[in-house]
Amino acid sequence: MEILLTSIPSFPVIKQFGPEKSEVSSIEYNSTRAVKGCAFFCVPGDNTDGHLYISEAIANGATTIVGSNETIMTEYAAQHPTLSFALVVNVRAALAYMSDFFYRSPQKKLIKVGVTGTNGKTTTATYVYNLFNLLGVSCGFIGTTGILGANGKIPFYKSTPTTPISSDIHKIFEKFVTEGDRAVSMEVSSIALDQKRVEGICFDVAIHTNISEEHLEYHKTFEHYLQSKLLLFKQAKATVVNIDDEGMAEEILEVISYPHLTYSSQLNSGADLIWTACESSDTGLKFDLCYQEKRWPVHVPLYGEYNAANLTAAIGAALLSGIELEAILAVLPKMSQVEGRFQVIHGPENRKVILDYAHTPVALSAVLHEVKKLSHKRLIALIAGIGIRDFSKMPKMARAAEGKADVLVVTVDHPGDNEPGTVIDAVLKGFTVPYKQQVVTAPSRREAVLAALQESGPDDLILLSSGSINGAQIVKGEYVPHSDEAIIEEFFSSKAGDF
């Protein structure tokens, strides 16, 4: 595609060197993936700076360079007069706008639902994805559990665990449109908002689930975390707000001036959508949904009472997208479980294994409360410290779980550059001494899953909490393949003769 950089909407070029027009074959932010004719964006990273890799990108064939360091850009432009160089204020914002232009703005052909919140992003975004597809609105998904089209998972190397970098997002949007999808449901993290990964995307519906302390290793302060999340609601046409959340609901309602629906579990809240009289059983959730002064019974094969809230948020998104409530209610019994979110796996001798990648103290406390509503004899729970996250959160995980299970298995998820023992010790500091329950430690998630299963007996519940990003564990910068489900299947198969 021949591109005149100064003609790209919202792409503010401060200064341009070399040819005004350039033939762009692709858009790259990783110099090792630069190819002939590509536009290379010097994206700043946590530990490095894209400007340091301009030489490599040019050697690999890049013919357009976009950066924000005027000194460096001027020097390279003088050395390579036949190449195009564009100086911009913010490379990440420039990448977003050029990607939208390069892929011919596929977002305009999609209903875009963005979900943000500390807990419940993946579940709520997946409920939107499932609900839209059940309603005949072919929908894609972008989030922690991968990239999905209406027909299932799409192989795609994700640049980040939750919300991809902008050039990847628009490339995925293009693929969805090509395959006939009409909508996309996506998780939008606070870090993605701060790093302008969704810059220039006008969401048809933004969903708020809740907020609690998280990602302070990045944001440093809770206020910056909050303000980053609020950015989503400044680039949306409509929104769904959880008014039970005292941390953020009021702030959202103050910044929006467009259609919105509120949701709550409280009958006297004045919310537009109210879920109430919720009951849990081994067959799923039953609750009443109140909307426009009417009350409808709902029974879904989903688990965890807090998921009634997440489902209600998804229903709100469908309503704001113009779908009638009666049509929504008709398909709810067909809703499916979310991978790794209160996902129930039935084992031998009436064991039940629950995968719920709760990775914050608030989420862990909530899921421990909910799993006890399922029939069981004993509860064995795996909890973890996440090595790539804020260490101050780790003892809080222990405090959230203490006294709420018969056995707690403590391990590490994604140790990163840390020694597993260091992370585990940080978690253990949160327990009172002597322990209120049996505590077992394991140096890896695999060993911890096996230890939890080994501790179980007939009629027991095994909760495997915390996370597994993109089917892997992050160890010293490497993504090591990991699957709790595969380990569970392997364990029960090897013990088949013992049951």
Image: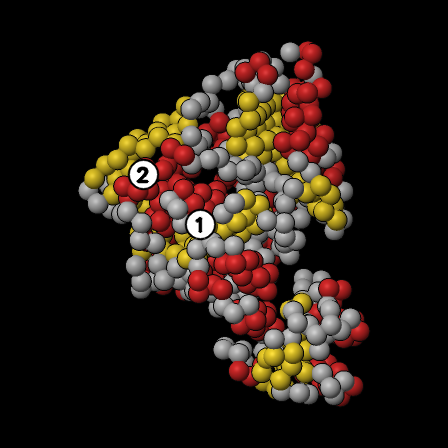
Of the pair 372 and 138, the residue shown nearer to us: 138
Of the pair 206 and 44, the residue shown nearer to us: 206
Q: Amino acid at mark 2?
A: Leu
Image coordinates for residue 24, horizontal then vertical, percent: 65, 75
441 relative to 27, above or below: above
Q: Report whether 447 appears left or right of 142.
A: right
Image coordinates for residue 421, horizontal then vertical, percent: 74, 37
| Furthest-top residue in this view | 498
Answer with the quarter of the image where residue 437 lies: top right
Image point (42%, 24%), residue name:
283
Which one is in front in this view, the residue at disc 1 or the one at disc 2? 1
Image coordinates for residue 87, horizontal then vertical, percent: 63, 81
Image point (62%, 87%), residue name:
20
The numbered mark, 1 or 2, whose residue comes first in the sequence reads 1
Spatial CA span between label 1 and label 2: 18 Å
Residue that numbered label 1 is attached to: 138
Image coordinates for residue 266, horizontal then vertical, percent: 29, 39
Q: Report whether 9 appears left or right of 241.
A: right
